Image (cartoon, coloured by chain):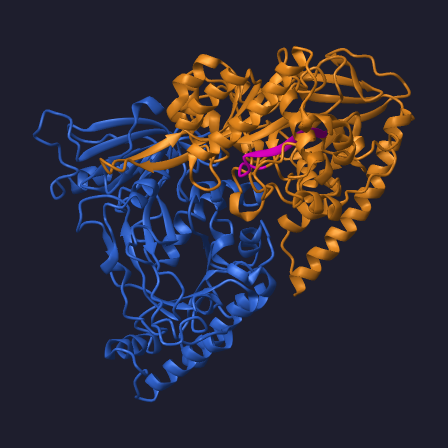
């Protein structure tokens, strides 16, 4: 009981403090009330370009204004002395469901749903993101729903979801792992939906009247999408409301129409499609779908997909690896045990890849919860450190289409930075500060949770 | 200075023992011998000698014969150059190779059930353990019955027969809520699952009642006569017991039962030992700490112990004997280092400390002369997540030496 009380109390306090702090921060960001910010004395790993042994980064109005050895710091600038520390671009998470209260919808065809409705800005996920240097995250529905809804890309700090949003329709999630164990019906159902959308597009192209399903589109759209709130205005996450819609099932005309729209956008290439493949054979199926419906895919690969590494190499697109980068398999026929090292296999096959994390420091996954650990694992098995760091910053930013804003320290990009206590892949290195849009959103020296975890004193 | 001393010692030993020990005398063979190995390491990490310094290890007949900055080893031998060398990892709490079910669920008092009789020596578990640098492991039965059975200690590779370190070893007591979780009495009243206890009070009661009966010359109800013999051994201190306890009150219960019946169980699990650390120290507690392990969350069931990362730091501060245990031990040590232990403390927590707790410090856990040649060679600093294990040596034999990894 004492535990629970302790945790509850801490969470509550933290939430309150976070809300207050972030409230101030976001307001300030919008008004550009703060003057310039300079980070000086640190080693800078900009990802694009060579590291600078000791350099300065100048930030103005949330953007990087200058970076280099001999930057003149304006007198009015607030200065962070980062002597002896290392500054990197904030990490980019290209695929995570941690921000959602429930990652998967029970109904298997819900293209009309958007994760935006289930993002809770004070979710522990975002707190962990800031603590671990993740500044942008693609929130994507889980891997268990056939068409699971639409992803969104957010910054990991903000008071309201609208403050955090970078991209609303950031990708339609499709899972090729059959919920019922039957791959034939899984694919057939998926094709049926895609065919409907394809036919609708063809009809439109011929100038024909849309059929009954699209007739109710306008009404449907209004019903399915929440009316846009005035910018910066309060938009509390409506858990009850979204739960209701999640179980609505999508059989009504409104959701049918909204779903069709989402699928049409995917086929027209206006929205990418996250395709989760569980095994090698799913990769083949995914490629067929991509060709048949001219989809813009972002492939999310389960453990077994390495068997299709040669096929994946031909596409030469960055794939998202399973969080378990190293695991064992036993050949069912020869009974031979084999250690599978995903980063090594994909590197050998020349398939570019990025990482996912799991569990966020829950004791179940101390290693794979952290992007730095995933990158270190790739380095352990032969990747260069330079490539590994790119795979947690610029590559995921490119993969999800936000590299114009984040992923590297370059003039004009968002000032999303992490100040590390040492070299990024060293076991003893901690995130000292996380900066999003030029605002300090995390400071280790003020992190009560870390203090509690590291100094075990009975409460 | 140190180098000279080592030279001197090495030379003296070589001269003195040459006539007696075939490992020291110059061999007759001309080919490099696989029985005699000289390892030259840029860094030797062991809790004796110059930690992390350059050094050499001479191995013969599966034992470490000499350790020093430079060794003039005799005769034809195999020379291995490595970056970093550390002792083989000792896992005090594993279920490696335990086949055909890990827990007895039909009865509560089965202290005579022996893990050693159910080890699948060719299990993949062992291949994975060797790959992760684990060379010695205690195999502990799962905890769904109160007197869960006997643990055993094995090497993770080698010729069968040579792998046994301690068969039929420590007696395992589940002083926690685990035994209540598998009770299906409500669904199958007539089945074999109809059993006590259904709550944790019952767990403690079964231990107390069983031990009381045996102490007063009686037998345990419905249990095999062998059970009685085993419980007697626990009572008269002939057999070490270990108590699986994770919450603070479970740990207290285990120590209380020990005091009541005059034995000293070693605590396995120990998540919340930090809450009662002063008391634990006063009562001479020892703990095998598993809360940093990957499976800890699934082990602890509904107990809901609070998460603490630096309990090892607290234990060291209080000078409580402890070690880390459970899977991914090298990564556990790396994180323990991250969370507050020094490099040396973190490494010791998976090598010499578990060897001490298992009573094996004369054989394993450090790189010293006359110990088993159980070693791990890495591409770099063992505490860094970027360092890879090149090979694992068990009793002088190398496993997983993958040239492509180097």
The image quarter in which residue A136 lies = top right
Q: Position of residue A427 (x, y in %)?
A: 55, 35
Q: Can you tell which chain is drawn orange?
A: A
Q: Is residue A391 above or below residue B330?
A: above
In the image, is A235 to the left or to the right of A97? right
Q: Position of residue A28 (x, y in %)?
A: 88, 30
Q: Nearer the viewer, residue A317 or A108?
A: A108
Q: Can you tell which chain is drawn blue?
A: B
Confirm whether the magenta stretch covers residue A153.
yes
Q: Position of residue A62 (x, y in %)?
A: 81, 22
Q: Position of residue B183 (x, y in %)?
A: 43, 70
Does any portion of residue A5 appear in the rendered image? yes
Name the dominant secondary structure of the magenta segment.
strand
Quarter of the C terminus of chain B within the rendering: top left
* Magenta stretch bounds: A142-154
Does any portion of residue A84 appear in the rendered image? no
Identified at 55% across, 20% down, the residue is A297
Residue projecting furthest to the left: B28
Q: Nearer the viewer, residue A96 or A111?
A: A111
């Amino acid at each position: 009981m004492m535990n629970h009380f302790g945790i509850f109390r801490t969470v509550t306090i933290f939430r309150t403090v976070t809300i207050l702090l972030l409230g101030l921060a976001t307001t300030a960001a919008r008004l550009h009330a703060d003057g310039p910010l300079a980070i000086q004395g640190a080693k800078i790993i900009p990802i694009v370009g060579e590291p600078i042994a000791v350099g300065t980064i100048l930030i103005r109005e949330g953007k990087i204004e200058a970076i280099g050895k001999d930057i003149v710091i304006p007198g009015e600038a607030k200065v962070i002395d980062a002597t002896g520390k290392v500054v990197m671009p904030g990490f980019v998470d290209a695929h995570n469901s941690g921000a959602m209260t429930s990652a998967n919808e029970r109904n298997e065809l819900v293209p009309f749903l958007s994760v935006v409705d289930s993002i809770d800005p004070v979710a522990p996920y975002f707190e962990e993101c800031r603590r671990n240097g993740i500044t942008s995250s693609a929130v994507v529905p889980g891997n268990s729903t056939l068409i699971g809804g639409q992803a969104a890309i957010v910054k990991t700090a903000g008071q309201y979801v609208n403050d955090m949003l970078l991209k609303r329709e950031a990708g339609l999630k499709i899972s090729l792992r059959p919920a019922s164990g039957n791959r034939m019906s899984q694919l057939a159902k998926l094709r049926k939906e895609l065919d409907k959308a394809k036919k609708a597009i063809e009809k439109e192209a011929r100038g024909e009247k849309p059929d009954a399903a699209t007739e109710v589109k306008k009404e449907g759209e209004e019903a399915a999408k929440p009316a846009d709130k005035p910018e910066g205005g309060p938009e509390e996450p409506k858990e009850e409301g979204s739960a209701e819609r999640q179980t609505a099932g999508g059989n009504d005309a409104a959701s049918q129409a909204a779903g069709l729209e989402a699928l049409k956008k995917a086929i027209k290439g206006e929205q990418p499609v996250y395709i989760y493949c569980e095994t090698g054979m799913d990769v083949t199926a995914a490629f067929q779908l991509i060709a048949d419906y001219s989809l813009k895919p972002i492939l999310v690969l389960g453990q077994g997909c390495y068997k299709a590494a040669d096929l994946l190499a031909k596409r030469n697109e960055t794939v998202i690896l399973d969080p378990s980068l190293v695991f064992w398999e036993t050949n069912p026929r020869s009974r031979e045990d084999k250690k599978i090292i995903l980063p090594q296999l994909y590197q050998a096959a020349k398939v570019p890849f990025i990482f996912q994390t799991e569990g966020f420091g829950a004791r179940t996954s101390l290693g794979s919860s952290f992007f730095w650990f995933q990158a270190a694992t790739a380095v352990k098995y032969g990747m260069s450190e330079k490539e590994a760091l790119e795979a947690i910053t610029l590559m995921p930013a490119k993969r999800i289409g936000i590299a114009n804003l984040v992923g590297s320290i370059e003039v004009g990009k968002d000032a999303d930075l992490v100040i590390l206590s040492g070299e990024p892949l060293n076991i003893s290195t901690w995130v000292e500060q996380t900066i999003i849009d030029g605002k300090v959103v995390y400071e280790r020296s003020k992190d009560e949770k870390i203090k509690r975890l590291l100094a075990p004193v009975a409460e | 200075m140190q180098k000279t001393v080592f030279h001197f010692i090495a030379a003296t030993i070589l001269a003195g023992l040459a006539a007696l020990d075939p490992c020291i005398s110059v061999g007759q063979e001309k080919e490099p011998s696989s029985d005699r190995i000289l390892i030259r390491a840029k860094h030797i990490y062991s809790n004796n000698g110059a930690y992390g310094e350059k050094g050499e290890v001479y191995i013969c007949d599966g034992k470490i014969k000499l350790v020093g900055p430079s060794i003039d080893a005799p005769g034809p031998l195999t020379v291995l150059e490595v970056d970093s060398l550390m002792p083989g990892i000792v896992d005090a709490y594993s279920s490696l190779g335990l086949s055909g079910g890990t827990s007895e669920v039909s009865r509560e008092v089965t202290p005579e059930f022996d893990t050693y009789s159910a080890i699948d020596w060719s299990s993949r578990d062992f291949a994975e353990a060797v790959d992760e640098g684990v060379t010695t492991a205690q195999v502990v039965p799962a905890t769904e019955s109160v007197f869960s059975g006997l643990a055993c200690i094995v090497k993770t590779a080698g010729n069968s027969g040579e792998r046994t370190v301690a068969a039929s070893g420590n007696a395992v007591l589940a002083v926690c809520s685990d035994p209540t979780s598998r009770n299906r009495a409500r669904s199958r009243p007539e089945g074999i699952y109809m059993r006590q206890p259904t709550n944790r009070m019952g767990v403690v009661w079964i231990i107390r009642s069983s031990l009381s009966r045996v102490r007063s010359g009686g037998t345990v109800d419905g249990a095999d006569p062998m059970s009685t013999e085993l419980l007697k051994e626990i009572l008269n201190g002939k057999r070490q017991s270990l108590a699986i306890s994770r919450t603070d009150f479970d740990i207290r219960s285990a120590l209380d039962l020990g005091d009541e019946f005059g034995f000293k169980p070693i605590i396995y699990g120990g998540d919340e030992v930090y809450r009662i650390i002063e008391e634990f120290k006063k009562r001479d507690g020892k703990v095998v700490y598993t809360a940093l392990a990957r499976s800890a969350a699934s082990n602890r069931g509904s107990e809901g112990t609070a998460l603490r990362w630096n309990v090892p730091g607290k234990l060291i501060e209080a000078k409580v004997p402890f070690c880390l245990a459970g899977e991914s031990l090298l990564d556990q040590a790396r994180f323990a280092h991250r969370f507050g232990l020094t490099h040396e403390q973190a490494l010791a927590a998976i090598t010499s400390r578990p060897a001490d707790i298992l009573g094996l410090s004369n054989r394993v856990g450090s790189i010293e002369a006359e110990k088993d040649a159980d070693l791990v060679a890495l591409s770099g600093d063992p505490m860094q997540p970027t360092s890879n294990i090149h090979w694992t040596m068990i009793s002088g034999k190398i496993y997983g030496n993958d040239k492509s990894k180097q």
